[in-house]
Each structure stands twice: as C-alpha cells, then as structure tokens.
Image: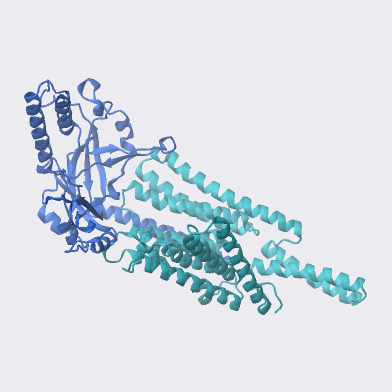
Chain colours: A cyan, B blue
Amino acid sequence: MLNLNRSDAQQRADDIGVFNRELSRLEAEQVLTLSDSQRANLHGYQQQLLNGYLAAFDIDHDIQAQQLSLGMRIASFLGALALAASVFFLFYQFWGLFGTQSQVAILLTASIASFSLTLWVQRLDSSGYFSKLAALVAFTCFVLNIVMLGQIFNITPSNNALLPWALYALLLAYACGARLLLAAGLACVLAFVAARIGSWDGIYWLGFVQRPENFILPALLIFVLPLLIDQRRFDGFAVIYRVFGLMGVFLPVLVLAHWGAGSYFDYPSGYIENAYHIGGFILAALMIWLGVRREWADVVNAGLSFFVIFLYTKLFDWWWESMPKYLFFLMLGLSAVLILLVLRRLRRRNGLLGGVQ
Amino acid sequence: MKSLRARYLIAGLVLIGVVNAIVLAGVAWNRQEPAESRLQLSERELGNTYAYWRKDNSSLALRLDYRWPSQVNDDHYYLSISAEKMAELGFDVPTELNEQTVRRYRRQLDRDALLVLELNGPAYQREVALLVAALGEAQRLQKSVPDSKELREAAVHAANALDYEQRRASRLLVVDVGRDQQTLRARYPDRQHYAIVRGIVEVQASSVASEWTGKGEDPRPQSQRWIWQLGGSADTPGVQSLHLPQRWHATFDGLPQQDESLGGDYTNGQKLFAAEVTVGRRLEPWVVELSGRQASKSQPTTKVQ
C-alpha cells in the first residue's frame, strides 16, 4: 500500500462496489456468468483488499458510512476550533496568576505536552479525526507560546514568528494528514515570505499587506511545489497546495485590478487596474487550460471561478451606472450562457469535465 | 511507520525547544547590563492599558504615554516630523510640489525608525512655559474686558490647561527621530533622561489654502491655490503595552489614589505610583520597579478670578 492515500483507497473501494453491482446486473441479464470458483476467488480478493484498506485508512465501506464520515469531519473541525479557542482563553484567564518563570514553564510544557499527545493519539486513531483535532490544539498551544513570550518580555512584534509557526503547522499537517493545518502552515509561509520581500530596505514589515504583489512570487512557488515534491502519500495535500497557490496569485491580481495605488509600479492607477484586469483574464484562462490538460479539477474550478469574478466585476464597472438594471442583469445572464457554451465545447473535447475521453 | 513517528516527535520537540531557546536568549541579551536607558516614570507617563476583555484576562499591562512637542503657531495642520527629517529617514521627498509629486510621496510605505524620548527635560519645560504664557495672555485680555464671559471662560480654560500640564500630563516628549542608534545616543548621552525606542514612521501630506491677496477674483488655476505641507508621523507599537509581572499585581491593586478634593476631573481616582522602566540592548523595555507614591498638593500656579 505504498504511495496510496485514503482517497485512493476509498476510490478503489467505491469502484469495487460499482463493479459488483454491474456484475449482478450482467448475470441477471445472462450476459456474463462466473463459475463458483471464479466468484469465490473474486470475492476473496476483494474482501482482502477492503479489509486492508479498512485497517490502514478506516475507509467508508458503504454510503451510510460515507454520510456519517462527513458528519464526523464537520464535528471534528468545529470541535478543533472550539478546543483551540478554549485553550487560548484558558491561558489568558489564568496566566496573570503566575510568576514569570512559571509562565514560561507552563507555555513550554503546554507546547511539548500537546505535541506528544497528538502523536500518541495519532498512533491509536486510524480514522484521523481525533489526531487532527489534537494537532490543531497543539498548534494553538505553540502559537500562544510564542505570542505570550512576546507579551511577557515586551518583545518588539516582528515577522520572525511566522516562520516557526509555519514549520510547526507543516510538521503537524504531515504527521497527522491534517489539511487544515497544511493550509495554516502555507498561510504562514506566504505571509512570512511576503513580509520579507516587503520589508526590504527599511520598510516596516507589516507594510507587506499594502503591496499585494508581495504575495505573487511565494504563491507561485507554493503552486509548483507538489510538482517538485511528490504529495501522493498525503490525501488531498496536492490540491491544497495548488488551490492555495492560485488564491495567493488571483486575490492580489483581483485587488490590484480595483486598487491600482497598491501596486509597486508607479503609473496612473487606471493603467495599472486595466493591466491587472486583463492579466487576471489571461491568467484565469491559462489556469483553465492547464487544469484541463493536467486533469486538475481543482485548478479548472479555481480558474473558472476567478474568470467569472473578473468578468462580472468588469461588467459592473462598465455598465452598472449606465444601463437599466434589467439590461445589466440580462447581460450577466447572457454572459453565463456564453460561458456554459464554451464549457460544453471543452467538455466534448476533454474528458475531465465529464465528457468522453 | 514507527520510525517515521519517532522522526516527527524528534523534529517537533527540537523545533519547540530551539524556538523557545532563541526567544529566551534574545530576552537575556536584551536585559544584560549596561542597559540602553533607565527612566524614573510615574502614572503620568505610564497609563493603564484599556482591557476591554479584562474579566477574561488576568494580566496587567501599562502603556508608555509620550507626546510630541506642540507647535507655537498652530494655524496649519500639524505634522510631527518635518520634510527634512523624513528625507534623512530614507523617504523620497520631492523638491517640486505638485499633485503628481505629492501623490508619489504619499504612496511610500511606513519605515522603521528610532525615536528619542526625553523625560522632564527642556521640551517639557517649553510646554509648561507655553501654557504659562497663554494663561498670562488670557488673564491680560480678561482684565481688559472684565465683563466678557467668553474671556473669563478662556482664562479658566487656560488655567486648567496649565494645571493639567503641571500635575497630570506626560513629561515624556519625542525630541528626535533617526535611523542610527549610535548617532542618536551620541547626540543624547544622558541615559537617565533620554530613551531610544523603536518606532514606525509614516508619510503625511496636507494642503492649506493660500490666500489671494490681489485685487478682484482669484485668477490662479485650482492647483495653485493650495500650499502643500509634507512631513510624517510616528508610532511605537513596541511600547504600547508593557507587561507588569505578577509580583507587582498586589502592589498595583493597593496603590494610593489621587484625592478627589485635590484636582479636576482628570485626576479623580488616578492611581499614584513611581516606576523604573529600563530599555535594553534590543530597545525592548521592561518594568524594573514599582512603588506607590503620595499625591503632591501642588496648587494651580495662578488663580483666576
């Protein structure tokens, strides 16, 4: 089961179910009949596979289990957020009652204990729900550790804290297969690199948010990372990298398409906004093409979403004031029909979007 | 799988340990002698931070209250840092002022800088002298027109302002801004009265209408009817909240308070204390000592009838 993640195992289990149902139909229609020994071999092999997947990944063996899994994921996510908030407020409620040395010792112990607990839970919990919950609490403890050391000793706020937070979140994400923590880690990496670029030559580090272009380079690096480092062993990680990378590029482009004054380029705002708007269209179209070519549904969807956002914001700029509202919305509707026609054409030519390969 | 988990465990523990060690080593280095500066402050310079979620937060923190010297001629919009100083701090300051150059000036991002805070020195004495002069002028005007209610109120206001300045206002004033710590320290060698703290400087530009002194209607185009003023202002996020260690919480809670009969509304219930604040090598401050003090029974300098 090397290089197999939970999604792959679940997909195979689903395929087995579909295959068995189709086989039953074919046998009922007397198109195909298996001998008893063939049937026994087939079912034995399938059962062996399913048992292996169940033990390794706690996959959903039927539709009801899938529905329950979704509920468990939601409960795990909400529980993790609530527990993280609880830890946060617990510290603030009582930390003033302790001396400085005790405060430092408590913060350090909380980080170490929560991290050890996470790995211990992960060893026992094949489903991953509880270990992911514990991992988020561990991350909260570490963030609090650094933030509160800063408060206790009046340390000047800086972007340096983002780097250990990023490393720790990524470590926990890979240890527990937690996509939420992967996203948190990537957000910290993105902010750290953007702040480093933005604070070049004596600029205050928080100024990086006023120049959205700072995010584009690190976001592109995040996008290409799964191409350089294989992520197949980690369920859904490559998708998180790609989507996060795309958001890190598209959002700054979208912001600059409406706020040219935020650009590093010293040209009139109107020029910059138009350039970024056109750039946004081209980039979205490129991403749709790339997604179709590489069979990355997430990239296609992200490209499409931003293409529509760019289109609608531009139509709003052009026509909202000058057109009667019924005409404006008619144009939006017609543009949606046009997009549908283009997508249908793409679907016929490519299998990714549901057509025939 | 087991060895992989062991690797994660080691990596995590090393990361937690190394990060904490780096932070604590930085704190130890900051607090090593000799300190960068040591200031004897009071409740006038250390305000209680506004803790809107106090019932959920058991810590105590004090805010370093400092201010900028006032302008004598306050007709125009006041910019704390001059254009010349902004150029020294690394900002591009245009020589020719028009819409285009001012727009370019304004879009520059905030820069790191160092602020020199002077405690109870010439800058504070100047503030007091300005208010004494203002009070003298207000009283002179009041005497010249004794029946004027407005002038009487202006004199009372001036007396109150002077009283506030002498008894409550912070004596900590920003006297210089720069980029190089050594240069600033050489300029202000007294470490008991001059502290250097980290700050952020942002650009500011304002325009004031230039009056048309010629005859008839103003023939100048709209762009020439305004005079641009370029400069900047500074903020100090690092000293907005000074943590008060737990060993002084009881002292702080039991501090004597300003007697209501002694002063105006602004002193009522004010906790009275003296505190020593040290600024370390990394320019990070901390409270070294805190003790209660008795209220001074100073009277307003001049009575207003």
Relative to A352, B3 lies left or right: left
The outermost residue toward the front is B216
Which residue is painted at 24% across and 51% down in the image?
B234
Q: Nearer the viewer, residue A148 or A316?
A: A316
Q: Quadrant of the N terminus of chain A?
A: bottom right
- Answer with the quarter of the image where residue B248 lies: top left
Q: Position of residue B174 (x, y in %)?
A: 18, 47
Q: Position of residue A88 (x, y in %)?
A: 47, 46
Relative to A70, A244 lies left or right: left
Q: Position of residue A69 (x, y in %)?
A: 68, 56
Relative to A267, B283 lies left or right: left
Q: Is A350 situated above or below B95?
A: below
Residue B186 seen in the figure: yes
Which residue is painted at 67% across and 56% down in the image?
A70
Q: Nearer the viewer, residue B164 or A45?
A: B164
Q: Is B25 situated above or below A298?
A: above
Q: Is A223 situated above or below A262?
A: below
Residue B6 seen in the figure: no
Q: Quadrant of the C terminus of chain A?
A: bottom right
Q: Is B177 situated above or below B305?
A: below
Q: Nearer the viewer, residue B114 or A349?
A: A349
